[in-house]
Image (spheres, rainbow, N blue to C red):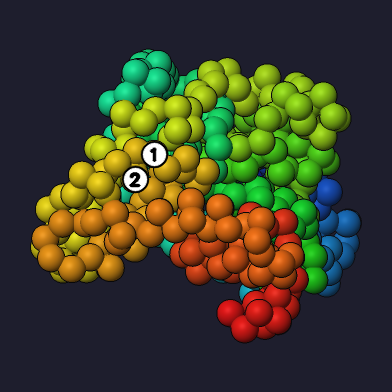
Amino acid sequence: MKTTEQAAPRILIADDQPDVLESLRLLLKAEGFVTESETSPAGVLRAVNGRDFDALLIDLNYARDTTSGQEGLDLLARLQALDSTLPVVVMTAWGSVEVAVEAMRRGARDFIQKPWDNARLLATLRTQIELGNALRHGQRLEAENRLLRAEGRPTFIAESPAMKPVLELIGRVGPSDANVLITGEHGTGKEVVARTLQALSPRQAKPMVTVNAGGLSEGIFESELFGHVKGAFTDAKTDRVGRFELADGGTLFLDEIANVPLNLQAKLLRVLETGEMERVGSSRTRRVDVRIVSATNANVKDEVAAGRFRQDLLFRLNTIEIHIPALRERREDIPVLAMHFLRQHAQRYRKSLGSFDPAAMQALLEHPWPGNVRELDHAVERAVLMAQGGVVRASDLGLQQDRDGARRLEDMSLEEVESYLIQKTLARYAGNVSQAAEALGLSRSGLYRRLKKYGL
Ligand SMILES: Nc1ncnc2c1ncn2[C@@H]1O[C@H](COP(=O)(O)OP(=O)(O)OP(=O)(O)O)[C@@H](O)[C@H]1O
Ligand SMILES: [Mg+2]
């Protein structure tokens, strides 16, 4: 990543004439710039591929006796494709304004005529460096803002003995840089734990950037993670900053990690091992400093045994593993969580509800909660909407129906059971068709077909 905002600006100068390079080097050095020089277009491309520069100052003619500027113009196009935020200033001979104009059309930011005026050259470079930094910074900020809008500090409730070791681990590893793998069933609070780790870490002022490996196709996933450069593939109309770069200095939360396709696992492993990556379509290596927190509800060790997950990657990810028990294994947390959600939803729906009546609390404690804390949250939300008067009653929760329903299953036809299951699942996922379809093991269209069939 760029680190040059405060450090001395780094300039790459390119010309085929050694005396030109030397006098530019002396001039720029005296003004506090760091310079590198190259004598050919190929050398320039190699240098830009390998390192970050704040600006390039390049001649347009390299082969002896040429004045067309063609080599320089070709070089500009390639530089533009590599990194369109990189400021390039071209040097042209006196009287070749057409070439200078053509260079500007191909992406040069400004031009200097030889022999140059020192003051004008320095002013031009400084302006372009400032603009370049602003552009790169802007590109980053815009993407960061999009991701951060939904962020807030998490409330993390855990009072049961089963959660004690979890709390201890969080407290211990939160402030460190260790990579953490969070495991647990659906809805147990893996994301809440990830946010809590981030809030405790010295990186808390930096973003926690989330990538959900479950929701993305393989092609898109790679450019989500690593970014891409314009033209890397048909839809790549502009450069794009990837999540790794966005998370630089902060934390990257890789959700549903078991779903990362094998070939991307190899690329992921490399960044974790070296801190180096390239945007898709670019061979320029960038360094990133990212803490990885990942989560999964799959058993990754089984995935490793089945050859679907790389063992070496797992070793990198689970320096520390935090396993969150299912809600049914920590019933002591149910009342506190339920009260927390009750307050939250009562406020949101402007209802003055203060508590659950004893039967309601009993029902909450007895329910198996296959959807864990998320299911509890949704059940309480529904109850808040249903409740009349100052307390939530068992009938408002609708959990009793489960048992009635379960008892009647044997008496139902197969179609009735299917319809019943679909309704239950939709209710559990608050009407979210994608999630319900996934839980039922159906495709979205498969679920829609059945909804139509049963008139739901
Ligand atoms: N300990 C907790 N304290 C307060 N709220 C919690 C707690 N655990 C979970 N929640 C809430 O329950 C919901 C589900 O939690 P979260 O999204 O973190 O689960 P998850 O394990 O990531 O689920 P999934 O596997 O489906 O991605 C969220 O609304 C979250 O705020
Ligand atoms: Mg989650």
Q: Please report contact status of discs 1 and 2: CB closer than 8 Å, yes or no.
A: yes
Q: Quadrant of residue 158?
A: top left
264 to the left or right of 326: right
Above/below status of 419 relative to 304 = below
Q: Bin the neighbour count of mark 2 within 10 Å (Cα to Cα): few under 14, some 14-19, many 20 and up.
A: some
Q: Which of 436 and 74 is in front in this view?
A: 436
Q: Amino acid under label 2?
A: Ala
On-image quarter of the C terminus = bottom right
Label 1 Cα neighbours within 10 Å, binned few <14 / some 14-19 / many ≥20: few
Which numbered tag is attached to residue 366?
Answer: 1
| Label 2 CB-ligand 1 distance < 8 A | no
Evaluate whether residue 16 shows in this view: no
Q: Is residue 3 above or below residue 360?
A: above
Mark 2 lies on residue: 363
Residue 409 rendering spot, x and y as whole percentages = 62, 57
Residue 277: x and y in percent read: 68, 39
